Image (cartoon, rainbow, N blue to C red):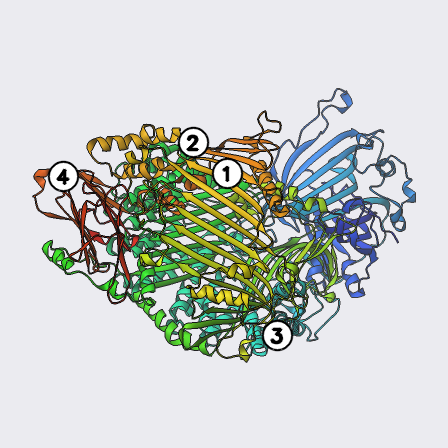
Amino acid sequence: MKATFCLVALCLIGWAASEHAFKVGKTYTYEVRGRLANGLTEIATQYAGLEIHYKVLLTVTGPNVVNFKPTDMKFFEVNDVIKGGWKEGELPNERPVEVAQEFRQYIESPMDIVFNKGVIESIKVQGDLPTWAINIKKAQASNFILDTTGVNLTLEGNLNRKTDHELPEERNMESGFFYQTLEKTVYGECETYYTVSQNGAFNEPMPFHQNHQAGVKLQDVPLNNVHVTDEKEFVGELPWHTTFHKFCNEKDQVYEIIKTVNFTACKNKPVLSYVAPSMIIDGRTGDNNFAGSIGIRIHVSRILACGQNREEFTILKMRHEEQVKVGLHLEKKIMTGAILNFTLVQITDVVAPVLVKDPKVITNLVYNFVLNQENLHHKTEEELPQMDASYMMNYGVDSVEEVKPITEDEPVVLPKPTLNEAPVNSMLITPLKVDGLKKRVVVLVREIGQDILNKNHDDHCLAEKGTLSKMSIVSKILRYLSYNDIQELYTQIAMKHQTDEEKIFRRTFLDCVAVAGTNPNIKFLFDLIMKKEITGEIVSEILMSIPMYIRTPTQEILNEYFKLVQSEVLRGNKQVLTTAILSFSTVLYEACINTHIFSTRFPVALYGKFCDAQTVEQEYLPYFIKELERLIRSDAKEDTHWKLVYLTAVGNIGHPVIVPVIQRYLDNVQTPIVKTRAVFALKHLIIARSNLHTEENKKFVVVDRQYEDILTNKVVKGKVLPILLSVAFDKGEHPDVRMAAITLIFHSSAADITVYQQLAYMTWFPASNQVHSFIYHSIKSMAALERPVHPVHYRLQNLARQVLTLCKPITIGYQSSRTIFNGDYITEFLTGYFSHFEYYGSKDSIVPNMIYYRQFFQFGGEHGLGSTPVEFRIHGNTLQKLFTHFVEQFFIPTTAQREAHDDLAKIHDLLSIKDRKQQENIEGYFYLKIRNEMERFITVNKEVIEQYTKDIMNELLPKLRQGLPINYQKTLRLAEYTMEFPTIFGFPLNYKHRMPVHFNIRGNLKWATEETLKDFQIQAELHPTYTWKTHDKLSVKVPFLNKKFETGFQNQVVVQFPFRALIRMAPRKQVTVAITPTHIHEQTPNTPIRLFTVHRVPYTAVIVDECWPLVHTEVGQVKVVKTLETLYQNEKRFGENKFGLSFLLHEETDYIVEKEGMNSWFNFWTKFHNIRTFAHLGWLAPSTKYAKRSLTIDMAKSQTKTFVVVVGGKWWKDQKNVHDVELIKTETTEEHVAGTVEHVLVVALIGKKTPIKPLTTTTGIQKILIKGVPSTFHYLAHFEYVKAVHGKFNLRLVAGEPCKEAVAKFPTNIPSLVAIREYIMDSRVEVQQLAKCVEIQAKLEVPTWANPQELVILRKRLLAQELVLNKNVEIKFGNTCNQMPQQIKIKGAWKRSQKMTEWAREKSPEAKRCIEDEKKGFQVSPICLKVSEQQAAALNLGEFEIDYTENIPVWFKNITYKVEDLLKATLYTYMQHNRFPEQQIGNLKMKVHFEMTPNKEYITLHIVKPTGHIEFRNIKTAVWAQKLFPLTATQSLWENVKDRSLRFYSEQSCTLEGKFVSTFDNVTYTFGEKDLTPGCTHLLAKDCTSKYPMAVHVNNIHTERKAVTVIVGKTKIIITPGSTVMNVRRGNFKVQVNEQVVTDFPKVIRHPQTNEFICVIEEMINGGIQVRGKYIKVATDGARVVLYGHNLLKNKVCGICGNADYEKVTLFL
């Protein structure tokens, strides 16, 4: 039969406010139509749901008593498309559902309802009803409540409003009004809004007769034709006017009543919820809008009645509608809707009412979550079909004697969960009982192991097998089991862990137990740890996840955890104990301290609070404080770790009582790294949590039972902020500690505009450049936020913008301390991100002391969900020293690096220099926080690094030689949001969001050598797999049918790549990497490998056993939601011709093909504003439509079994003898130019039919490249770079047979290239491969007086001549490398424009400052060097002419056209396109003009083509463009980027000229002749740590004939100017090396025994001598000395050049 939906809702009858509304002795018959549906309404009309038809007999047995008897209940289920929508559409293919007789007697049982003025006082139900049936009766009774007189009034509104009608007979009558009441229903005790419309006397036509009224039909259907058996004949509501004629008097008033439930203002609201991690920013689960705009819940009732007044009327019709929608935005919403319509069809004299058997009186109508597992444990059978599979946790009975009525001051709470029994859980739809559930766990765990191992090498990935769903189901089942049940399963599944399969079973089960998170599960894990049945890293991983998974943190389970933390079992493993301490402290904060978190994170709505701040202060904090007090008196190195750990722990707890302890640490501890950590321990005490019980809501104890919070503004402002301010403004404090305090001040809720002004003003009197830079750049970055995500970020932005102009700007590079904030918000997706990146600069290195990063995502608006996926901090004393010490364990300093000249010791003694020894311990830590709850903390120091090194050498390497088996897997639940609450039917509605993640890697690693370490190979056979999934679903569970009607959306990604690999360093220095895609232990790779899979599946389902994943047929009926009749399918193979590998791309989607094109993707990208936003939020999908995509490599159809990459070549730089490199002659001189560099690099890609053998079957080195063995493809990239004054560049790209021509030309004196030539020449290509050769040759002609080899070129020298760098590029194409007829020639030049010349000469601010220095006689001041390098040498103008042959390859043309299209699309607003220019160039020609403005703010690009002129004018440059451009003549691209990013500190310099000295720290000072003694030697710089033996000193410092001595190791170089006083030219210097006069340049100095490079001495083109060593570079022309120091010399040198720590206060220490 076709079941049609007429009047939807179970709302039954409203109740007039008097016993006279229904007359005693009468029976009122109502016809009820109800429907519930689950679907994705925004993309399709497919729903899974249930329709209900029945009659209700309401017999008035007394003045206030009504007997309620449902009869003839019929049910129809559907899982299909409903045309016309879920509310009134006709059901297709509906299936009648039979209800077991034992359940039918429950749902059709009678009940008596006792009223008092329309409000229910109690109900009387059958005594043997199970809990689920009682909940249904409560819902039915709740729909009777109709408080039209305001019995429980909360807002009077205009309840007693009277009309002012123009007709006398209708004047002073009741009229429409609005008011609010507090109604006790199945939803709890909630505010309800009433809108009553009184339309006057009934007299046709009434307003609701018109066509525009929803649901009104004009046709007049006689009421006596309406019977229950004829309900299928009607669509929509029955004719109103017919109903009025039958049951109303002519002059009756017409009432339309609208009721809306305010779920946000409820107390004792029955919501079983759990959120992990703590994501809810504002609001509560089950509210009208929960999680911001992500979730919407609504319940609206419409009642139509007629009568004499509000106290005497007859309810004719009632429509109750309920909807819950959840999703990120409109097109991603999943929906559950329920409608219940009630229509009066007959009034008769009383029929004998059905008596309630063994009655039980219930006064509490609130939906009941029950406690014990009687339904699971009642019988031992594995399966009991159609039995009560609901809550399985029954807590007593709902009788008057045992259930106390709800009172204002005493909210009803359930008993706290125990350690041995499972807590309240959601209704479980399954035929299984306890034994069956345990067997199901065993089956699923074994299936998971088989899925991971994939021994059959099938092509189905983990997504298709539902592996993550299986893991989730195992965890779900474990939540319903007791401690003994879990222990039994562990014994059966996870006790053994010898084989790979057993290890997988064990790890899977343990991960699922942790994810389950109930008290029995967590207690079981604690017991395993105490028994030492699990040890090591697996314990750390489990304990780390406890804060994420714990569901009911009762006092009992907290005590168990505290015992574990204090136990001796954990003392033997530092990392396990560390993780336990941090994990426990996080649980305390979330469960006891932060009231907002524990009231939204845990089910306190049912249990009340689990713990409070007072309990923490009395029972747990004393232990942590005692440990901190003990450690504060200890100076032992090993205790630094525990200081940091316990400081982090008390910071996690966030109780104000720790403030004095932190103050003592700041006062008594000297180590900066510990003090910084102590400051960060206040992180949870800087933002006051507002008083939640305001005057507005004191009347209601809201559902999540929010409590008074201890962290008030008085605490933050009175105790915490003073500490932070005192540290921040203490100039004697270490900069790292001060910056940590400033970070917290910025985010503190007590930091007002005055505090920000103080910080801004402090930048004018800084004692530290690092602190100055940190404050300025932090405020600047906050002020630059364009679209803040969270109100906190709005506040930061607002305050920063008010004080930014008060800050003193600082022009300092990226190596100095700063904070970088980024954020954006995408309105269409209601999603935003905020990232916080900061670092503290180091005085020892350009590598920071501390690096911190935190990422925050917000969903659903500012009151939605907030998540911090990752947060980490790396801090060290210092990071550079830690890294250097680690490297030194493997690379011992050479003899040349250790030896020192005797003069260094003499200088040391003469000047009484004290060695600058490391005062602070070399130590640091790494802190990681995942999802704001899972923490790891690792510390390192010298001893730890040395121990790690020993472990690597003594333990790891021997194991690698034998073969190291790897079998690791980890499953995490990164997010879970679940809630369950009742519907209008009394059935539970459940929402779940899950995000499981799984990673596993299996296989072996091996280390093989032959003869010596000159030939070694790393061998690997691994199968890594990573998969993650998000699953959102809404479902309604019908207990008497044992079915669940569900809709949801699954999004899963699977990435895997099983392979064998060989990495070999061969004797001839070629590096070979070979990879064979294959499953583990597969001898010959002949099976498909699914590399990448994406599944996006919207669905509806009717589920009969939710203990199976959706991919199992036993789960029920699952249907994918589709919008297209025929899905778009695409299958494409590629890679066979080019690589011999057969890739298969398979695609099946519900998207229209046209919307998958580039234009659609471009429109999608533009929503994200910029690249940074797309990088953070690009994963957001615009819809939930179905899509399945996969990329497979079919090894059976692939001729290539092994893909080989070979790298060879040689990299020359000054370290080699001049005679080893090609000497390039310049156009102006025959002399050899110093600094000649040549680089040769070759990369060969070779395909082989021979696979790599399994590691278990081989010993020694596997050789995959063997002479004579055929190949499947050859590719070659050959790069050569020759650099002198003129640079030459050559790149050759070759494919196929021409590779042999290319390798034949390789030089024979480079062994690695000889090896590559043999590999290619001696093997034929058996597969037909496209033969191509492309060669790019470029030559750059640089003026000899302005070239990168000169350390210093004065500004005036560069501006004296026009600066032009000619550039010639030739690109050739051909099928062979010997003949390449297709050519592109590019001729042109990079120039310094006239505007740039003027800018560098006098117009730029820097040039003006330089002119002032030059007038003083300081031409090598830092600002002048900057102008010289970045402005006077700038090449901001490019003019090029391009000629090309007619037969250019089509593929190359396509690339150029795509680049042109991209430029047009990206720079459209700057573009001018003239398609018909007056002046045209000839065919096969192009011209390109590029110019950047001198201030680097704009770029203009002009392209002239035969088909037109395209100009992009005044393009606004981005930061990255300003770092890259303009090019310069005196520096490489990398040097420019480094200088523009790090400014003066990219390469620390010290300059000396006349009476001026500019130090490494960019501080300039002067000295007079009276301060100097003639003939004295002045030490410019010396390594004062004795680690890097070097020194530079100067004689005659006050003259312009300075003699410079450079000492590097045991080499002493003396540079003495000739007789010319000024401008000493080339050749007019005397240079001595260890008293030997040097006459030929360049002169390379090497160690006499090891031949190791020490330095090179060169003549400068513009006059002078320069010395370039590994750690120091010196240039002098007699009048000036310029010294450049390596980064490793930071804070290690002494002398008049300073100590290079970037700080002024310690300049000459």
Q: Residues within 10 Å of mark 3 (few under 14, many from 20)?
A: few
Residue to which mark 4 is pinned: 1567
**Which of marks 2 and 4 precedes in the sequence?**
2
Of 1203 and 1509, nearer the camera is: 1509
In three-dimensional space, the C-alpha distance between marks 4 and 2, rounded to whole angstroms, equals 40 Å
Q: Secondary structure at mark 1?
A: loop
**Which of marks 3 and 2 precedes in the sequence?**
3
Of 1608 and 34, nearer the camera is: 1608
In three-dimensional space, the C-alpha distance between marks 1 and 2, rounded to whole angstroms, equals 30 Å
Q: Residues within 10 Å of mark 2 (few under 14, many from 20)?
A: some
Residue 628: x %, y % from top left: 31, 61
In three-dimensional space, the C-alpha distance between marks 4 and 3, rounded to whole angstroms, equals 78 Å
Q: Give the residue type at disc 2.
A: Thr
- Give the number of the disc on residue 1082: 3
- Give the number of the disc on residue 1406: none
Residue 1515: x %, y % from top left: 49, 33
Q: Residues within 10 Å of mark 1 (few under 14, many from 20)?
A: some
Query: Image quarter for residue 389?
Result: bottom right
The structure residue drawn at horizontal position 7% and vertical position 38%, both measured from the top left corner, is 1570
Residue to which mark 2 is pinned: 1493
Residue to which mark 1 is pinned: 787
**Which of marks 3 and 4 precedes in the sequence?**
3
Q: Are marks 4 and 3 in contact (CB under 8 Å)?
A: no
Is residue 618 visible to the viewer in this orientation of the structure? yes
